[in-house]
Image (tube, rainbow, N blue to C red):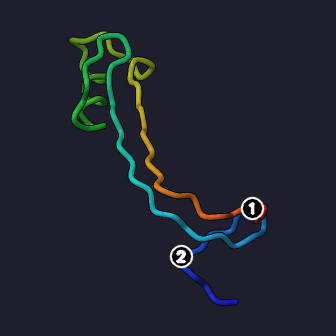
């Protein structure tokens, strides 16, 4: 059996790999400040001048899928 980079195995069955668009927003959960990068958020946590902790950092990921392939065998 050859390797196909366009498929993955789910529950022992090969299914097509789908590409999806994602958008990640990193923000301070208490203040609502949106960080441009994860590095900026980490710098805020490490800054002794702020009381920001790792628990204050919130990451939201939006996933956009145009169409899911039929991976479960569907019904007719």
In the image, 52: left or right of 19?
Answer: left
Residue 69: % across, % down = 60, 64
Residue pictured at 25% horizontal, 25% vertical: 34
Q: Nearer the viewer, residue 59 or 45?
A: 59
Residue at disc 2, secondary structure: loop
Where is 50 relative to 13, above or below?
A: above
Neighbour class for label 2 at 10 Å: few (<14), some, many (≥20)? Answer: few
Where is 2 relative to 62, above or below?
A: below
Residue 14: % across, % down = 69, 73
Neighbour class for label 1 at 10 Å: few (<14), some, many (≥20)? Answer: few
What distance separates the C-alpha of mark 2 from that of mark 1?
A: 21 Å
Residue 26: % across, % down = 33, 31
Residue pictured at 64% horizontal, 89% vertical: 2
**Label 2 vs 1, first from the N-terminus:** 2
Residue pictured at 53% horizontal, 78% vertical: 5
Where is 56 relative to 73, above or below?
A: above
Residue at disc 1, secondary structure: loop
Give the number of marks.
Answer: 2
Q: Which residue is mark 2?
A: 6
Q: Nearer the viewer, residue 1 or 17?
A: 17
Q: Which residue is mark 1?
A: 74
Residue 29: % across, % down = 38, 16
């Amino acid at each position: 059996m050859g390797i196909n980079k366009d498929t993955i195995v789910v529950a022992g069955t090969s299914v097509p790999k789908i590409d999806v668009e994602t958008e990640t927003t990193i923000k301070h959960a208490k203040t609502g400040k949106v960080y441009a990068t994860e590095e900026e958020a980490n710098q805020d946590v490490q800054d002794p001048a702020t009381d920001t902790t790792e628990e204050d950092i919130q990451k939201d990921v939006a996933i956009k899928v145009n169409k899911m392939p039929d991976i479960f065998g569907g019904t007719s």
